[in-house]
Every structure is written in C-alpha cells, then in structure tokens.
Image (spheres, helix red, strand yellow):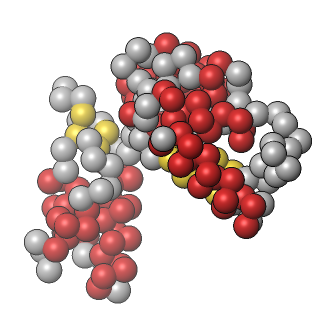
C-alpha cells in the first residue's frame, strides 16, 4: 500500500511539474520495498507510462556511511592533511560499498545502488571547532547584528567534540548553537 501511495505521489507531482525535486530523509531507515518503489523513476527509461522523469531530481539523505566519513577525515588528520584536501573520489567508492553491504541499513543491497542509479554520493564531513565558531558568529550576527567573541568562545567551548582523546569534531555540528546562544542573551 505504501509503495503504491509513494509511486502515485511521485507520478502526480512529475505530471504537474517535470522538474520536481523529491527529498527523502533517513533513507538508511526506509523499508527496502519503498526504496525499490522509487527505482523505476530513476532508471534509464525515456518515459514511464507516458511521463518522463529525466528532469526530476531525487535527493536521498542518510547517515549511512558516517563512520567511514569520520575514519577518512581522521586518516587525513593523522597524515597531517586538512579536511579541505579530501576529494569526492576519496570517499565515493568506499561509501557506496559500505552503504550497499551494511545489513543494518535499508539500503542493504538496494537496487538503486546495485544498478548504479545514484549519480553522486555527497558526504557531509564532520565540523571542526573552527566551523562551530563560524556558526556561532553567524548566529550572533543574525540575531543581534554584532559579534561578541567572548560569547562565540563560550558557545563553542560548550559543544561536545570527538574523538575523546583529540576533541576534533563537533558531535552535533552546529545544530545546538542557536539554543546555546539564547542562554547568553
């Protein structure tokens, strides 16, 4: 029933607007049957039941592969390289394999990956202390129109970082910066 509803929803939207964008969050938790229901719209057909899906964009968000991303960033750090030196091709092949072979993921052996229907795996790298500082500055500027470096430091220092021995990356990224700022206003 959910597969049919999802397919009807996709068909209806693309019929109204060929350049539709679909965003699916937490794909790694989605039931494999629902994932397979999306496959026909991504496959290499000119048309499907009289409708072309070639101008539609499907974005799949997932935490799958997060451990591989973190390990790659740590490897770069341990080699004295900067996070910015990581290239997409440093992560893409290992992310595809990790996601495809993870039995705990809804993407395990998903036909979307097996048939190479996903064009790009775009990793979101963990944020470092300096990135959290930038978020805090931006949040202060948007709320107050000015930046107080003492507050920036307090907010940034309150965040939790990992790994425990190095304290390099923010556990929550910048998600709680705004709420932490409220305690200083």
The residue positioned farthest toward the right in the image shown: 46
**Residue displayed at 63% across by 28% down:** 112
Observer-nearest of 40 and 96? 40
In the image: residue 23, left or right of residue 16: left
Q: Residue at x 24, y 29 (%)?
A: 163
Q: Is residue 184 left or right of residue 60?
A: left
Q: Nearer the viewer, residue 56 or 12?
A: 12
- Label count reads 0
Q: Quadrant of residue 174?
A: bottom left
Whether residue 123 is visible to the viewer of this picture, yes or no, is: no
Q: From the viewer's side, name the closer residue of 52 and 148.
A: 52
Residue 10 visible in the displayed image = yes
Q: Residue at x 85, y 50 (%)?
A: 50
Q: Quadrant of residue 103?
A: top left
Q: Residue furthest bottom?
A: 145
Q: In which quadrant of the rendered view does residue 144 lie? A: bottom left
* Left or right of residue 62: residue 47: right
Residue 43 locus on image (x, y percent): 76, 33
Q: Which residue reaches farthest front?
A: 1
Q: Is residue 28 left or right of residue 113?
A: left
Residue 108 in the image: above or below residue 170: above
Residue at 65% over, 18% down: 114
**Placement of the C terminus among the 4 image quadrants:** bottom left
Residue 153 picture location, percent across and down: 21, 61
Name the one closer to the observer, 176 or 62. Answer: 62
Q: Position of residue 99 (x, y in %)?
A: 50, 22
Q: Is residue 144 shown above or below 26? A: below
Q: Position of residue 178 (x, y in %)?
A: 25, 68
């Amino acid at each position: 029933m959910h597969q049919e509803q999802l397919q009807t929803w996709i068909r209806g939207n693309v019929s109204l607007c060929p350049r539709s964008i679909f965003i699916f969050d937490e794909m790694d938790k989605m039931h494999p049957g629902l994932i397979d229901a999306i496959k026909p719209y991504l496959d290499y057909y000119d048309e499907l039941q009289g409708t072309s899906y070639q101008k539609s964009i499907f974005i799949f968000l997932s935490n799958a592969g997060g451990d591989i991303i973190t390990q790659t960033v740590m490897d770069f750090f341990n080699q004295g390289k900067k996070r910015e030196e990581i290239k997409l091709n440093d992560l893409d092949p290992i992310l595809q394999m990790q996601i495809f072979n993870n039995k705990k993921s809804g993407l395990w052996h998903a036909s979307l990956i097996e048939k190479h229907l996903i064009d790009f795996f775009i990793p979101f790298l963990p944020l470092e202390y300096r990135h959290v500082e930038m978020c805090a500055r931006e949040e202060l500027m948007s709320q107050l129109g000015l930046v107080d470096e003492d507050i920036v430091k307090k907010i940034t220092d309150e965040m939790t970082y990992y790994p425990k021995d190095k304290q390099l990356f923010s556990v929550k990224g910048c998600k709680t910066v705004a709420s932490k700022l409220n305690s200083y206003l």
